[in-house]
Every structure is written in structure tokens, then in C-alpha cells.
Image (cartoon, rainbow, N blue to C red):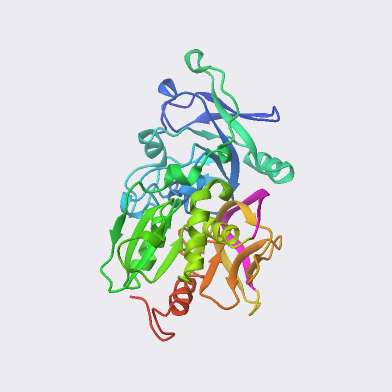
Amino acid sequence: MRSKNNKKVKLILKDGSSYEGKSFGANISSLKSISGEVVFATGMVGYPEALTDPSFRGQILVLTYPLVGNYGVPRKELWESEKIQISGLIVCNYIDTPFHHASQMSLGAWLKEQNIPALEIKDTRRLTQKLRTEGVMLGKIQFDQKKNNEKISFVDPNLRNLPAEVSTKKIKEFGIGRETIVVIDCGMKFNILRRMVARGFKIVVVPWDTDVTKLDFPFRGVVISNGPGDPMKAKATIKNVKKIIKQKIPILGICLGNQILALASGGTTYKLKFGHRSQNQPCVQNDTKRCYLTTQNHGFSVKKIPTGFREWFYNANDNTNEGIIHKKLPFMSVQFHPESSPGPLDTDWIFDFFLEKAGLINKKDKIK
């Protein structure tokens, strides 16, 4: 049965427009109003992975697919981080009767457990069209109860150092391979770790501001993970990646890692109008002209390609940059998520390509 926690709540955008909906998430009797950046994602499935993706830190997420919750929530081992990362959730129709062999609980129960507000707003199509036309904007979920009717300001999460908020606080080791790869955690999705461990490597995950050139153990390559917010806020990461480049250690950047590699190499970045958040973004590889379906979640993009690099991929929808690769050295990055969680498996080969260029595998090698 649907929860009785369906009181009227409003999503208010900074331009003054408001959208009334029914609450199905956190118990609003004990929750304060929240503020964040309102963004939309167009994937048909994959909400457990999206909600636990650290790249959504500080954002109120609008899911455009009209039915959400159908298959419940899987066990924690299948999430992309330890908890729900979004600030709030907006859907058109919430399904509170999930049916799936992997379901452990309903979406509503999960949101209540983690104290995340969620609204059913019937006209999510109009809301999404507004965000596409005018660009993503700040918003707040305002509760309609007297004790929770406090004044709350519109707060831009991109003004904060979001990678520092979501990064691991200590060094962690995974896998038992002979060779070691370091992952700089700027908001890493766990499937990056899973895909690297599956290839038989020892993976050491380090905090976002770690100077890996000073680590007291040998390693053969560095992965700069995905993560939330403005890449310019991760100044310590950019500074440390410059040192990695100077020592010519092989680098693979993913999503935010693409932007950080570009900035560390002398490139520039900028904020997109409404970003890319879905599992159906078409990306074209420049040298082969092959088009891949990709999973993405970002609001910033590379503008100027740094000297010594060339554009590796571009977006077939808007021609924005989707990756860079050095002309001679083993430095490369992609704006999309090759770990494909959620979404298509088209670009999982990126990991093998990086490992081959780093001299760690041969072309004929296969993952487990």
C-alpha cells in the first residue's frame, strides 16, 4: 500500500516558478526544506545506480521516464557508493509495488531510510522542457507544514569543493593482482573499481588531494575518477596531476577526470547549459567515426584542448568534447562512463585500451 506520507510539497525554482507534488520519500514531519541544483536525467532505468552516483552530490534530480520504482532497490553491494548522493528526487509516477528478483526494498522505503525527500510531480515533461530551454537552475523543496516552513535560500552546490565531500578519507586497497593501479577518488563510482579488479589488478584508491608521486609503493598507472561539480574547485587534484604528467605515468581520466586532465595540461573547461545525464548519449570516436552509446552524468565540459592532445571523442548531439588523448604519451580521458553502470556496455573497451597503452596487457588479453 502507498505510504500515508503524501502531503503536498512544492519544488520552487529560482526564477519563481513552483511545482506542487506529493511526497513519497523522507518523512517530512522530521525533515527540513532543502536546496540544490535542479537537473534532469533521461534514462529509462538505472535509478539505484544514478541515486548513489557521487556525481549527483548537491543536486535535485528530475527523472524524465514516467514510471519510477518498478523494480525496487537491490542489495548494497550493487550500489555505486555507500549511500544515496542526491539532495532530492522528482518523478512523474512513483510505483510502490516493485517486482524484481534482486529487489530488497521499495524505492520509497529506501528514500525514507536515508532521509532523502522525493516528490511526485505530474508534469515533469514541462519542468524538463523548462530546464532544457532556460538551463539547469537552483531550486528548493519547500515543505508545507508550519514547523518546517522555514525560509531557505537558494544555494549553488557548484560553489563548494564537492569532490572533497564525496572522496574517500583514507587509502583503500582492492584486488590481488601483481601490478598496481592508483585511482584518485574524486567521487568514484564503484563499478570503476569492479571493472579494474576484474582485469586482474590490485587497485589502490586514494583521496582526491593525494600526491601519488609520493606514495611509498610502486604502481603502473593512475585513474582519475568521475565526481561532482566544477572541476576548478579540485585545485589540489589538478596540481598533483601536473606532477603525474611530468613523470610520464600513464593516466586515464573518467568524466570529471577528463576535465581535470585537460586543466592540468593547460586546457580550459566551462559549464554546459543543461549538461548530459542519461544512458543514451551518442559519442563519436574521431579517428574511426564509430558512434557509441554512453552513460553520462556531468554539467561541465572541456572547452580548449590542451597542447599535445587531440580530441578523442565528441558528442553527436551537440558536438561538445567527450574525451582527449595525447598524441605521443599514454595520457587519455573520456567524458562518459566506460564502466557502464547503469547503461550500455559499448565502451568497456576503454579500460583495455588504457592498460595496453600503459604496457600492462596485450591486445589479445581478455578480462575475466
- State the image quarter where residue 144 is shown: top right
State left or right for residue 267 relative to residue 78. right
Q: Is residue 175 above or below residue 120?
A: below
User: Which of the image's four quarters has the N terminus?
Assistant: top left
Q: Position of residue 284 (x, y in %)?
A: 64, 71
Q: Is residue 26 magenta?
A: no
Q: Is residue 35 above or below residue 158?
A: above
For this orientation, the residue located farthest to the right is 133
Q: Is residue 92 visible?
A: no
Q: Position of residue 100 (x, y in %)?
A: 37, 53
Q: Position of residue 339 (x, y in %)?
A: 45, 64
- State the image quarter where residue 151 is shown: top right
State left or right for residue 82 relative to residue 57. left
For this orientation, the residue located farthest to the top is 146
User: Looking at this view, is 86 or 200 the one in front?
Assistant: 200
Q: Is residue 237 visible?
A: yes
Q: Main secondary structure of the magenta part?
A: strand
For this orientation, the residue located farthest to the left is 176
Q: Position of residue 165 (x, y in %)?
A: 44, 42
Residue range highlighted in magenta:
267-285
Q: Residue at x 61, y 64 (%)?
A: 322
User: Which of the image's four quarters has the C terminus?
Assistant: bottom left
Q: How many labels, in total?
A: 0
